Image: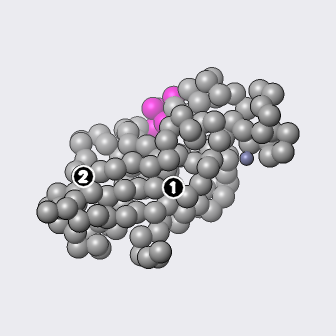
Amino acid sequence: MNMMNMIEIRTGKRVEIVDITDKVVEEVQKSGVQNGIVIVYSLHTTTAIILNEGEKGLLEDLEKMLEKLIPRGARYKHDIIDSNADAHLRATLLGNSIVILVDGGSPVLGTWQRVLFVELDGPRTRRVIVRVIKGD
Ligand code: ZN
């Protein structure tokens, strides 16, 4: 595995949303690929990657939504061995990876689109793969 394609993220809270857009843009530019796609892929089962607006209030709303839909400690079977079932379940809901088009050497992002890493069982050090695939 090419270490150049790995982003390391240190989180400081149990649930935390980290904007990694600039790092993804940097990896795409470093790759030298002009046109293609970039895949942003988390190596963990209690994190997620989403593409959305990074506005502070919205991020708080997202955390609230996760708490409401999948509350912590709601008699999950996995909690018997690892007490973090809510984090796994929330991760499945949000998804583990995203794909972004690359054009002219940069990711194609709408005005409000940001690449957001979602920590669901922190604080921890996390690894995210950024793989740029050349098109034509
Ligand atoms: Zn677990």
Answer above or below: position of 69 versus 1: above
Is residue 107 visible to the viewer in this orientation of the structure? Answer: no
Percent x, y of residue 52: 38, 39
**Does ligand 1 reach within 8 Å of label 1's beta carbon?**
no
**Magenta stretch contains residue 20:** no
**Sequence-wise first label, 2 or 1:** 1
Instruction: Tell how many labels.
Output: 2
Coloration of the structure image? one colour
The residue wearing badge 2 is 101
The amino acid marked with disc number 2 is Leu
The amino acid marked with disc number 1 is Ser
Mark 2 residue element: strand
- Residue, far front: 136
Answer above or below: position of 1 versus 111: below
Residue 34, located in which quarter of the rendered image?
Answer: bottom left
Percent x, y of residue 12: 64, 54
Label 2 to label 1, Cα distance in Å? 18 Å
Side (left or right) of 54 relative to 84: left
